[in-house]
Image: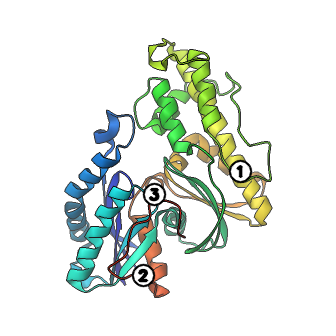
Amino acid sequence: MKILTIESSCDETAAAVIDGELNVLGAVVASQVKIHEIYGGVVPEIASRAHLERILPVIDETLRRAGVALRDLDAVSVVNTPGLAGSLLVGLSGAKALALAAGLPLIAVNHLQAHVYACKVAYGVDPFPCVGLIVSGGHSNLYRCLTPIDFEPLGTTIDDAAGEAFDKVAAMLGLPYPGGPSIQKAAEEGDPNAYPFPRPLLNEPDRLEFSFSGLKTAVRYKIAGVGKVDCASVVISDRTRADLAASFQAAAVDCLVGKAMDALRLTGLDTLCVGGGVAANRHFREEIEKAAKKRSVRLYIAPPKLCTDNAVMGAVAVERYRAGLFESLDLDVYPGLVRN
């Protein structure tokens, strides 16, 4: 079996060729970070236009690296939910065209299921059933993952996603986009206990939701005071910036780790799979490993290169192929969290 997987849910144009044993025969990711850096975040219209320019060259290079032609493939898979509508449409249109031209089955992939499945690809084990935690720029979600393609929602964020909060706090601190790596670097020189920022909802152990808006606001007030003063106009020292970054990072990580442990307790499961861009954060990885060890939890956290958006995690399409879950050419995109 050889499946071409396509990922274009946000600002990464990616493709990979995966075989039935989950071996990666070829993979390419074209990042748009430099394009969006000037805006401090992803601009949907610009992202979709960049996908249009890159989708075919990325697929062509992926097939070349894998040493296969379209006629050698058994299926084409593509992420169609969730994500930015315009970005998803570019990937879906490309996948449909290839499937039609080569007479190949079309497989739909859920981006969040793919993030969890990256753990199976990376570790070569079957972690299901498990609790799945996806933490990224657009998502902070907990699931009961019965199988690779059967997820039950447990909780999500009621406002900002964790990665969004990292980006916005980085902007307040005058740090470059993307915020996750910038805050991690600044925090290395800071004191995580310098500022007692709130841990929203952490004292409600039976509530499996996240909230980062209040934490973000607390950082703003610490920088500029209560009111509408622009943080960019406030001069802070490098030491203060480092302490703010470290204290924010510690609070955000405590919330993520705490709710993941709550989910394991409430579901009775003893396996946790973690994916998404924020999962590449060093402090987060250290803290969730400590918590998992303390509670005798089997932890599978995707390696950093599989945390950020990529097409290798689209290997979950192998599971859908074996289950005979194919799509017609009228398949649509679903930007919101409306489908498993």
Q: Secondary structure at mark 1?
A: helix
From the viewer's perspective, is 210 left or right of 335? Answer: right
Coloring applied to the structure: rainbow
Q: Are marks 3 and 2 in contact (CB under 8 Å)?
A: no
Q: Which amino acid does the dot numbered 3 rest on? A: Leu
- Find residue 306 and name its label: 3
Q: Which quadrant of the view contains residue 318?
A: bottom left
Give the residue displayed 33% in from the left and 42% down from the top: 33
Q: Crowding at label 3, few (<14), some or many (≥20) Cα neighbours within 10 Å?
A: many
Q: Quadrant of the C terminus?
A: bottom right
Q: Which quadrant of the view contains residue 201?
A: top right
Q: Secondary structure at mark 2?
A: loop
From the viewer's perspective, is 104 left or right of 110? Answer: left
Q: Nearer the viewer, residue 126 or 207?
A: 207
Q: Secondary structure at mark 3?
A: helix
Q: Crowding at label 2, few (<14), some or many (≥20) Cα neighbours within 10 Å?
A: some
Q: Nearer the viewer, residue 305 or 205?
A: 205
Q: Which amino acid does the dot numbered 1 rest on? A: Lys
Does residue 22 appear anywhere in the picture? no
First reached walking from the N terminus: tag 2 or tag 1: 2
Q: Which residue is mark 1?
A: 259
- Find residue 281 and name its label: none
First reached walking from the N terminus: tag 3 or tag 2: 2
First reached walking from the N terminus: tag 3 or tag 1: 1
Residue 95 x %, y %: 29, 72
Does residue 310 appear anywhere in the picture? yes
Circle 2 or circle 1, nearest the eye = 1
